């Protein structure tokens, strides 16, 4: 069989993976703090004669650019202006998020919408009251007194972060770093997704058309192969 069919097949598979990533982006276009994903492809010269190249997915990168800060007026909504993440405690260990739409638990814990405890510099944060103020450094104040400070962290290389269950987790051995002095916490705001819905839809249409093209190539090569086999059979 002509190996060209495998080239076309690899292209179709890559477009399927591309659409999976784009679908995930579109599904989270209204998710606070969500960062768009982008598949990374490369050509792999696996043909023994180094004539045909086959595409393969190498990784999925994350666009960590700042989203728009949207005012909500809620005292437990926080947004980070600049680099860094809120540190949270999950059943699987420490996680990181840009979604600062927090809530107060029944026992006073400051929680994410998924129920993860929000960490302060001295451990999980507890609130004696939801009537708090937060300054630009992330310090929580009640009745004029500091009652806690949000744990903000970042990494020198953000590619060590992997998105799992709504939070990011760092690869083993990765070391947290302090955020930039220019990083600020804004109370009463949340950071919106940085996904451009119109651009994502346009890219998805391109991926779908590319998938259809590769599918037609596969069908055409298959038809040619079958025709050749049938003609050889009649000749013999």
Image (cartoon, grey):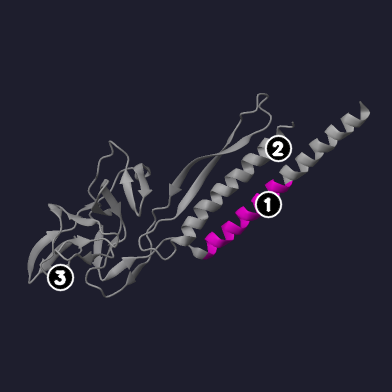
Viewport quadrant of the C terminus: top right
- Mark 1 closeness class: few <14, some 14–19, many ≥20 residues within 10 Å: some
Mark pair 3, 2: CA separation: 63 Å
Q: Magenta residues?
A: 198-216
Viewport quadrant of the N terminus: top right
Give the mark, 1 or 2, whose residue is nearer the N terminus.
Answer: 2
Q: Residue 132: give its label.
A: 3
Nearer to the camera, 230 or 129:
230
Q: Which residue is at 68% across, 24% downward?
A: 49
Nearer to the camera, 230 or 171:
230
* Residue 137 position within the rendered picture, expressed as x and y whole percent measured from the top left: 18, 60
**Res. 46 in view:** yes
Classify mark 3: helix, strand or loop: loop
- Mark 3 closeness class: few <14, some 14–19, many ≥20 residues within 10 Å: some
What is the quadrant of residue 5 in the picture? Answer: top right
Q: Is residue 182 magenta?
A: no
Give the mark, 1 or 3, whose residue is nearer the N terminus.
Answer: 3
Q: Main secondary structure of the magenta part?
A: helix
Q: Which residue is mark 1?
A: 212
* Residue 6 position within the rendered picture, expressed as x and y whole percent measured from the top left: 67, 36
The relative height of residue 43 versus residue 117 in the rendered view (above or below) is above
């Amino acid at each position: 069989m002509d190996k060209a069919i495998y080239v076309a097949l690899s292209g179709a598979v890559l477009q399927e993976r591309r659409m999976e990533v784009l679908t995930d982006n579109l599904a989270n276009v209204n998710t606070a703090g969500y960062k768009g994903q982008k598949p990374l492809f490369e050509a792999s010269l696996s043909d023994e004669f180094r004539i045909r190249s086959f595409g393969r997915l190498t990784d999925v990168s994350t666009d960590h650019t700042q989203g728009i800060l949207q005012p909500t007026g809620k005292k437990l909504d926080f947004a980070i202006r600049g680099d860094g993440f809120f540190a949270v405690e999950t059943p699987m260990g420490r996680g990181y998020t840009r979604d600062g739409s927090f809530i107060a638990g029944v026992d006073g814990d400051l929680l994410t919408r998924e129920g993860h405890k929000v960490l302060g510099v001295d451990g999980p944060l507890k609130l004696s009251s939801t009537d708090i103020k937060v300054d630009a450094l992330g310090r929580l104040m009640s009745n004029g007194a500091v009652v806690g400070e949000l744990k903000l962290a970042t990494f020198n290389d953000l590619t060590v972060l992997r998105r799992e269950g709504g939070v990011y987790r760092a690869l083993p051995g990765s070391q947290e770093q302090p955020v930039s002095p220019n990083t600020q916490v804004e109370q009463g705001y949340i950071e919106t997704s940085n996904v451009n819905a119109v651009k994502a839809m346009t890219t998805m249409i391109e991926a779908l058309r590319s998938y259809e093209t590769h599918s037609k190539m596969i069908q055409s090569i298959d038809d040619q192969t079958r025709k050749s086999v049938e003609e050889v059979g009649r000749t013999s």
